[in-house]
């Protein structure tokens, strides 16, 4: 393993050297849609990202950042990305884990932002793999070791997502409480205050669906154009409450799913909704069509998730399962079998994989 890793790292370095690759600039993408291009990231903290633009040093609040693209990684992160590009996510997270362990044990990385970024990248890759246990563990490690990182709030939300998907409501509520405490104690900006409130709504079983929706509508309105990703996530949860209520109230199911469809269509029309939220919205549209006995439309929406948002493991296994069911209902047994094989091969530990076995085409 070590020899193979070294060879990959040498190959990446040699390729860059051969191409005479210039030192390219970093890019900052803000939540409001603005971009800060051709800069060099100096440091990322819980409150700000410091960058250089020529000889000038400036900063932007961390809560206003959607993502950062780095043009030059330390060799270990380059090596992990090479593994990922080769279709080996396990190799990628192993390299990242080793690098983070080294840095948290006294390593001397010159790029101040890199260790926390590597820890977050490990969370992202495990999320893409649908590895809930690994996702929670990687997020917990980031929370423990990088308390001043801009990735800290996102790590709490990733940990919460893993716990919710695993059905561990008790741990999820504890994570929400710890996140709320962080937001309050560090006086984090409005974006994270809204995310904290959204997380509380998602985990409060005592709230009736109508009360949930009232709070979600308020959160979305407060988020507005300034925090569009939070707004669209609040809409998504709103739509999901309609679907959950439809299952419990059969007599009102058609009307409730009609309301859900309106919300999901609002999200898919929003150019600033992020990938996870779009995956959830298209899954919701698939559900609306499936229960309206329109398997063709249902399959189309589920396939949007599978093809266009393949890394969103919170929704892809479910989309594969219901695409399988939809193709079965429409008489396309070949494509139904394709969906069955895919969910079994890619997500063998998912409850949707087990569910698929009951309906094997």
Image: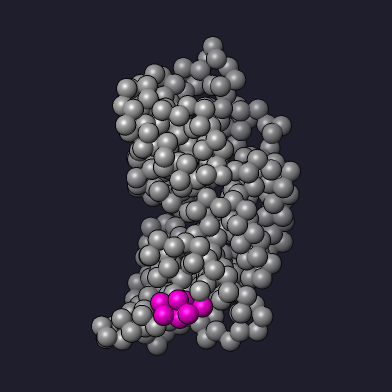
Residue 317 position within the rendered picture, expressed as x and y whole percent measured from the top left: 47, 41
Does the rendering let one see residue 6? Answer: yes
Front in this rendered view, residue 213 or 145: 145
The residue stretch that appears in magenta: 2-8
Residue 41 position within the rendered picture, expressed as x and y whole percent measured from the top left: 45, 77
Tell me the residue at 52%/27% (across/down): 358
Q: How is the image coloured?
A: one colour
Front in this rendered view, residue 289 or 331: 331
Does the rendering let one see residue 220? Answer: no
Q: Residue furthest left?
A: 19
Residue 326 position within the rendered picture, expressed as x and y whole percent measured from the top left: 38, 27
Front in this rendered view, residue 121 or 344: 344
Tell me the residue at 33%/79% (across/down): 24
**18 lies above or below 206:** below
**223 lies above or below 355:** below
Tell me the residue at 69%/43% (across/down): 168
Q: Does the stretch in magenta take in 3?
A: yes
Quarter residue 277 falls in? top left
Task: Classify residue 292 as left or right of residue 334.
Answer: right
| Magenta-drawn stretch, dominant element (helix, strand or loop) | helix
Q: Residue furthest top?
A: 251
Q: Does the stretch in magenta take in 24?
A: no
Q: How many marks?
A: 0
Tell me the residue at 40%/70% (across/down): 82
Residue 81 position within the rendered picture, expressed as x and y whole percent measured from the top left: 42, 69
Task: Classify residue 291 as left or right of residue 99.
Answer: left
**193 lies above or below 26:** above
Quarter residue 192 falls in? bottom right
Front in this rendered view, residue 8 or 241: 8
Question: Which quadrant of the rendered structure holds the C terminus?
Answer: top left
């Amino acid at each position: 393993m070590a020899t193979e890793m070294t060879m990959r790292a040498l190959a990446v370095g040699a390729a860059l050297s051969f191409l005479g690759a210039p030192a390219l600039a970093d890019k900052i993408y803000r939540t409001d849609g603005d971009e800060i291009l051709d800069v060099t990231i100096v440091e990322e903290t819980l409150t700000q990202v410091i960058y250089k633009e020529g000889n000038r040093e400036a900063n932007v609040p961390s809560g206003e950042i959607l993502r950062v693209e780095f043009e030059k990684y330390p060799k270990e992160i380059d090596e992990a990305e090479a593994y990922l590009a080769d279709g080996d996510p396990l190799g990628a997270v192993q390299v990242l884990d080793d690098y983070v362990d080294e840095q948290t044990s006294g390593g001397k990385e010159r790029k101040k932002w890199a260790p926390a970024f590597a820890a977050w990248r490990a969370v992202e890759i495990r999320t893409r793999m649908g590895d809930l246990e690994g996702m929670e563990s990687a997020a917990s490690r980031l929370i423990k070791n990088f308390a001043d990182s801009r990735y800290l709030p996102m790590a709490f939300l990733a940990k919460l997502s893993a716990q919710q998907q695993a059905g561990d409501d008790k741990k999820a509520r504890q994570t929400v409480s710890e996140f709320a405490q962080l937001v309050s104690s560090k006086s984090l900006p409005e974006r994270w205050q809204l995310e904290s409130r959204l997380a509380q709504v998602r985990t409060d079983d005592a709230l009736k669906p109508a009360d949930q929706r009232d709070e979600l509508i308020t959160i979305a309105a407060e988020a507005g154009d300034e925090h569009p990703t939070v707004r669209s996530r609040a809409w998504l949860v709103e739509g999901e409450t309609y679907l959950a209520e439809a299952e419990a109230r059969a007599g009102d199911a058609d009307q409730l799913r009609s309301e859900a469809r309106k919300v999901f269509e609002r999200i898919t029309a929003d150019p600033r909704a992020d990938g996870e939220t779009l995956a959830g919205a298209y899954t919701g549209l698939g559900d609306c069509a499936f229960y309206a006995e329109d398997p063709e439309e249902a399959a189309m929406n589920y396939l949007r998730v599978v093809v266009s948002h393949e890394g969103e493991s919170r929704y892809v296994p479910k989309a594969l399962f219901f695409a399988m069911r939809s193709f079965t209902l429409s008489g396309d047994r070949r494509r139904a079998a394709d969906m069955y094989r895919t969910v079994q091969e890619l997500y063998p530990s998912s409850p949707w994989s087990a569910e698929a076995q009951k309906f094997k085409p």
